[in-house]
Every structure is written in structure tokens, then in C-alpha cells.
Amino acid sequence: MAIDAQANLRSLRDVLRYAVTRFSERPIFYGHGQVDAFDEAALLVMRAMKLPLERMDIFLDAFLTHAEINTLIELIERRVKKRVPVAYLLGEAWLQGYRFNVDSRVIIPRSFIAELLKEQLAPWVPDPAAVSSILDLCTGSGCLAIIAAELFEHAKVDAVDISVDALAVVERNVEEYGLGERVRAIESDLFQSLGAARYDLILCNPPYVTDQALATLPPEYSHEPTLALAGGPDGLDVVRQVIAEARAHLNPEGLLVVEVGDGRAALERQYPRLPLTWATTSAGDDMVFLARADDLPGQAAAARPAAA
């Protein structure tokens, strides 16, 4: 099919139509930012050609070289046959208007915490200029750390991940944003290597996919590092550790912000007396919780399960 396509495609419009058809023919999954075959095709074709997606109409009738057509067909077929997410095919992903380098060493950026950061965490952070220290746990590509550094201009940010491979991607993204003096990549299993460091703000988009859900994810997710997805039997393995240790690393009046996917009910069952605030995001009010330092338990109390 690819050989026949190469002989009959000439313009960007032709290739876009071909991509939509191919994507519609196969049961690919649109779970990394796009909603349907057209959006997926437009993103892949335009960004692969280094063209602005928002000005697609200007370029639709532009003729492509044979080499460009071959490149696009190869990418389209990898998306269809190998189920590789578009972000990995392109080597880039976008989150709240920010571009990040990505590859299979890191999870594709898609955190709802980024929506809250764009509003500088209002109203929970009354004075963004007063925030001087931020920790981003499970940083992955460094996307939240970089967005936080961009929007909290007086803050230094520690971007923490257990994966050395992920931190290499973080450092590349930090360099491209020119934030090397303010964003530091740190290898650590959560708080383990941070000593007595304390922060005004702790962000965490941890692995939170339950074991059962992980076993049934579409093939696209198999290209992402399992370490960045797997949250244990109830999806809260890492979340429990964060709750247990965060208070010791927050300044007075410091704020903890954690994404839990669809884990709100399980979390509230386990911590019925923990005063959490659930932020409203585009996905509803059960994805991201916030807690003040003084409201978080000490390590021993946090580790204690709720009474039956």
C-alpha cells in the first residue's frame, strides 16, 4: 500500500487525506492528546514537515518532494502498524502551549496539574512572586518543572526522577528553555536523596495506573516506560509514599499538589480524615488534590491504614 501511495500522493492535502484514511481503517487509540483520526493526522503531517499546525490551510496545496512523501508514509505506517504514539514519532509533545522533547525514555506529557500551573495555582497560591522553591517529583520529561519555573519566576525548581534515562531528557528540555540556572535534575527515589530540603510547593504526577488497568491498556501505552505508569494494585503505591513524607519537605504553609487519575475514591477510603482539596480541571474534580503542610500527617500516621 505504501508503494502505491507514494506514486499517487503529491500535495500536503493528499498526504493528510491518506493519513486520515489509514488511521480510520485501523483500531488505533487516541489517548495522548488528540481526539480523532483527523486531529492525529494533522498533527503528525504538519509537525513532521516543521510547519505550524495553526496555519495548515496555507500549506495544504503545497507539493511535497518524493523524500518528504516517503518520510510521511513511513511515519503513518509506524503509527498504524506498530501503534507508536505520534509524540514518539515526532520526538516532541505539547502541554499547555509548551513544547517538550520526548522519546520512549519518558512518559508523554499529559498532566492536569499543568492546567493549574497556567493559573499559577490560584487561589491556593496567593502570591506567586513569593514562591522561591519548587519540587517536581516523578518529573518524567521535566514538563511540570519547566512550566513551573516559567510561571513562578523567582523559584528554583528541583526535578526529581528515579530514572537516569528520564533525567537525560529533562536536561535537554531544561537547556532548550534556558533554565539551567533555575531547574536542577536530581536522581532520587522520591525524597530519598533530598536530605532535609524543604520547598514552598511540591508537585507530583506519579505512576497511578492500577495493575488491572495496566493489563488492559491499548498497545500505544506499551511504548511508554512501565515505571512511569504502574501504581500497584490500587494505583496508590507511590501516592501513599508521597503523603507519608511530604510534610517533612514542605515549608510552613507549603502546598502539595498530586495527580491521582481516577484514584480519588480509593484515596478517600484509605485516608477518610485527611483534609484534601480537589481542584477542578478539564477532566473534572477528581484528578488532582491539594493539601497544606500543616494538614498532612507525619510519616508514621500517614502510613497507618484507615480503621476498618
Image (cartoon, rainbow, N blue to C red):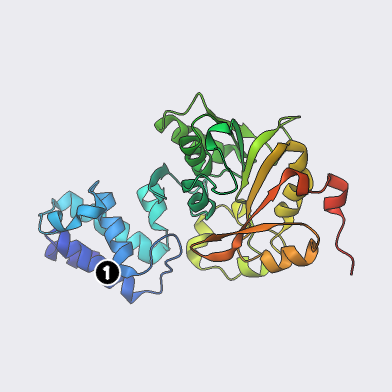
Task: Provide residue 39's location: percent of width, then percent of height.
Answer: 31, 64
From the top left corner, tell me how far across and down residue 105 is, in percent.
52, 45
Task: Place residue 128 in its image quadrant.
Answer: top right
Query: Can residue 204 be seen in this snapshot?
Result: yes
Q: To which residue does mark 1 refer?
A: 20
Q: Residue 153: image x %, image y %? A: 48, 31
Q: What's the amino acid at mark 1?
A: Val
- 283 horizontally vs 241: left or right: left
The 10 Å Cα crowd at callout 1, few under 14, some 14 to 19, many 20 or more, is some
Q: Quadrant of the N terminus?
A: bottom left
* Left or right: 51, with 128 as reference point: left
In this rendering, position of residue 17 left or right of residue 203: left
Front residue (pair 210, 224): 210
Camera-side residue: 208 or 87?
A: 208
Instruction: Indicate the quadrant where residue 62 lies.
Output: bottom left
Write the residue at 70% across / 40% down.
253
Residue occupying the point 55% across, 41% down: 166
